[in-house]
Each structure stands twice: as structure tokens, then as C-alpha cells.
Amino acid sequence: MSHITILGIESSCDDTSAAVLRDGIVLSNLTANQSIHEKYGGVVPELASRAHQENILPVVHQALSDARLKLEDIDAVAYTLGPGLMGSLMVGSSFAKGLSIGLNKPLIEVHHMKAHVLAHMIIDDAQEQPEFPFLCLVVSGGHTLIVKAESPMDMTILGTTLDDAAGEAFDKCAKILGFPYPGGPLIDQNANGGDPHRFRFPVSDIPNLDYSFSGLKTAVLYFIRDQVKADPKFIESNLIDICASIQYTIVKTLMQKLELAIKQTGINQVGIAGGVSANSLLRSNLLQLKERGVSAYVPKFEFCTDNAAMIAIYGHYMYKEGFLGKLEASPQARLEF
Ligand code: KG4
Ligand code: ZN
């Protein structure tokens, strides 16, 4: 049987990534991060697209060289069509189209969020693949979704956030505490050893499987403002307990709806994706589901955050099914799921 070799290109936000997969196995997966955004406290779209423009050629070149392949060995070029930042998406899509024309090889358009879910199917010694159907909690700086994946090409959203994403909630709370962007990982680190029940913040309870995190951010803002008024050293003297309490609240909110989704669908295969899946409490809570007969899957971290290997695995399945892209397709900042 002949091999399927896919070059994946991801440029939806602030990471420029390229990967080569052969038959679903990663031969290379490379990402150039953009540290420039740190000093602005968030991703600056204009700067992101310029950095993609600088990074894309060296990243793709290196991905091919790490895979020990030449451009001619690629069967198709898969790229992120959306959702994401328009200027960033345009760099990846234009590059992919140029390659496709130059090589006379097909293009494959990939939905970034569906690719996060399908990252579970990447074949790697360090991760086990769930069986279909499975549920996936996708939690990043821009998205919070509970997805039901019936097959690689058949996914539906069961729940989403009505306001902030989970990562955004972490980052906004971190900012209130004075941490630099992105503060999610710093809340995680500083929560270590803290008392998660010392300070109580609201766990949103909205109908169905949807989420809301804006109430938490406001509650933390007012709480910290009032406490600091009474004691200017309040944050530093209570940092680990504040971080543990915020983290506990966000993770509890995420887990409550995920557990409800398991109950409602009867599906007991559950995965997680997106940058927030690095969170230590979320990981341990997810793995605890095993005690209740649920199979929990946490992909290797490099496949959880934005990466091109997930774009290439989605491309692999699309290629197998014959879903090829068109040169006329234009990137979409808000691409329907
Ligand atoms: O998926 P990702 O790398 O980028 C996109 O948003 O697309 O996710 C980044 C988000 C940020 O909000 C970051 O603060 C959060 O993931 N994050 C964490 C942790 N590591 C990353 N949040 C909580 N705990 C962590 N350990
Ligand atoms: Zn993402």
C-alpha cells in the first residue's frame, strides 16, 4: 500500500507551525512562537501576521528537513482555513496555495477547532488514541467547546462559552493579580500547595452544556480591589490560596458540564485539547474520571497547544476521504464548525 504524506501548516493565531505526517505518524512538528506579544499583554494581530511572514518559510523548510523529505515527497498540503486572526490566516493560506500550485499537489482546507479534536488520532508512542465516538473538551485562549466526535469527519458542538474562553478567564484573573500575559500557567504554578477552598468564587450555572466565565472575572476583580483597599499587601500575602481558589473554580466549572455531557450522551471516552489542557488540576480531574469507568485521553502536550501536526492529521483523513480544497477558498476568521 502506498503511503500518505501530508504537510500541515498552521498560522491561525500567534504560532507559525509546520509538520509532516506519514500515515498519521509525525515525522516532524515545528513551531515558531512569537514572544513579541508578551509586552503588550495579548496577541497584537498586526504584529502576528508580520511575524508569520518572517517565520513561515524557515519553519516549513525545517519541518521538511527534519522529516528527511523533499517537497516532491508530499502528497498534499493541509492548511488552517479558520477560525483565527484574518491577517495570520492569510499568511498560511497564501503560502499553502503557492506550494500547491508550484508542486501541482492538492490543497486541503482544515478547520482549526476540529483539528484540535482530531489531534487525539495522531499516532505517537506517547499517546493512546480514543475510539469513536468520543467527547472532547477543547479549552484554549480563544475557545471553550464540548465536542462530540462520531468519526474524523463527523463532529458536533454540544456546548460552548457564551462569553470568555477558559484560557481567557485564567489570563484575565492572572492580569488582575499582576501576572504578565499569558498568566494561565502562572496561576497553575502558584496554586501549587494553596488552599482551593479559602476564597469562594462563583461557579456559573447556565442551562445546557454551555459555559460562562465573565462573572468569575468580575467577582475576582471586585474581591481583589476591596481586599487590597484594606490591606495593600493582600495579594502577595495570600497568593497561593488566591491562585488555588481561582483555578479550582475554573476547573470545577469545566468539569461539571463535561460530566453532564458524559451523562447525557452515554459516551464514556473523553479527551481534552487546547492550551488549558496543560493545567495540572484539570488533568488530574480528568484522569480521576477513570475511577468511574470513563476512559480519559490527554494528548501529548505539543499536540494540545496550537500545532501543525493536528492540521496534518486532519488533512490525512480528508485526503483519504477525497475531500480536497480549492485555490479560490479564502480564509475565514469566523469559520462555521
Ligand atoms: O491553545 P493555546 O496554546 O492557544 C490558543 O489560545 O489558541 O492556549 C493558550 C491558553 C492561554 O490562555 C494560556 O493562559 C492557557 O492556554 N494555559 C493555561 C496553562 N497553560 C496554558 N491555563 C491554565 N493552566 C495552565 N497550565
Ligand atoms: Zn487553537
Image (cartoon, helix red, strand yellow):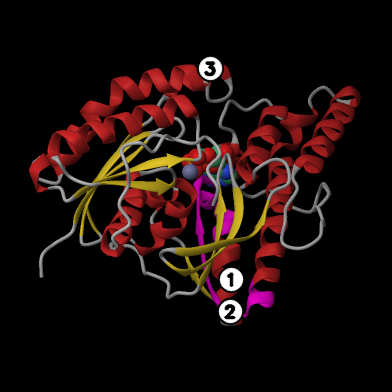
Q: Closer to the camera, 333 or 277? A: 333
| Residue at disc 3, secondary structure | helix
Which amino acid does the dot numbered 2 rest on?
Glu
Mark seen at residue 136: none
Q: Earlier in the sequence, mark 2 or mark 3?
A: 3
Residue 62 seen in the figure: yes
Which amino acid does the dot numbered 1 rest on?
Gln
Q: Which residue is mark 2?
A: 291
Residue occupying the point 32% across, 21% down:
53
Mark 2: few, some, or many residues within 10 Å (few <14, many ≥20)?
A: few
Residue occupying the point 45% across, 24% down:
87
Q: Which residue is mark 3?
A: 39
Magenta stretch, residue numbers: 262-283
Between marks 1 and 3 in the image, the one whose residue lies nearer the viewer: 3
Residue 195 seen in the figure: no
Q: Closer to the camera, 102 or 80? A: 102
Q: CA distance from mark 1 to mark 3?
A: 37 Å
Q: Could you tell me if the residues under marks 1 and 2 are in contact, i.e. CB atoms within 8 Å? A: yes
Which amino acid does the dot numbered 3 rest on?
Lys
Mark seen at residue 288: 1
| Residue at disc 2, secondary structure | helix
Locate residue 37, reporting x and y percent: 49, 21
Is 123 situated left or right of 134 in this image? left
Locate residue 266, reporting x and y percent: 62, 80
Quick check: is the Cβ at mark 3 less than 8 Å away from ligand 1?
A: no
Mark 1: few, some, or many residues within 10 Å (few <14, many ≥20)?
A: some
Query: As displayed, is residue 136 above or below residue 27?
Result: below
Q: Is residue 129 magenta?
A: no
Q: CA distance from mark 2 to mark 3?
A: 43 Å
Q: Please identify the quarter of the rendering in which residue 171 is found.
A: top right
Q: Could you tell me if the residues under marks 2 and 3 are in contact, i.e. CB atoms within 8 Å? A: no
Q: Could you tell me if the residues under marks 1 and 3 are in contact, i.e. CB atoms within 8 Å? A: no
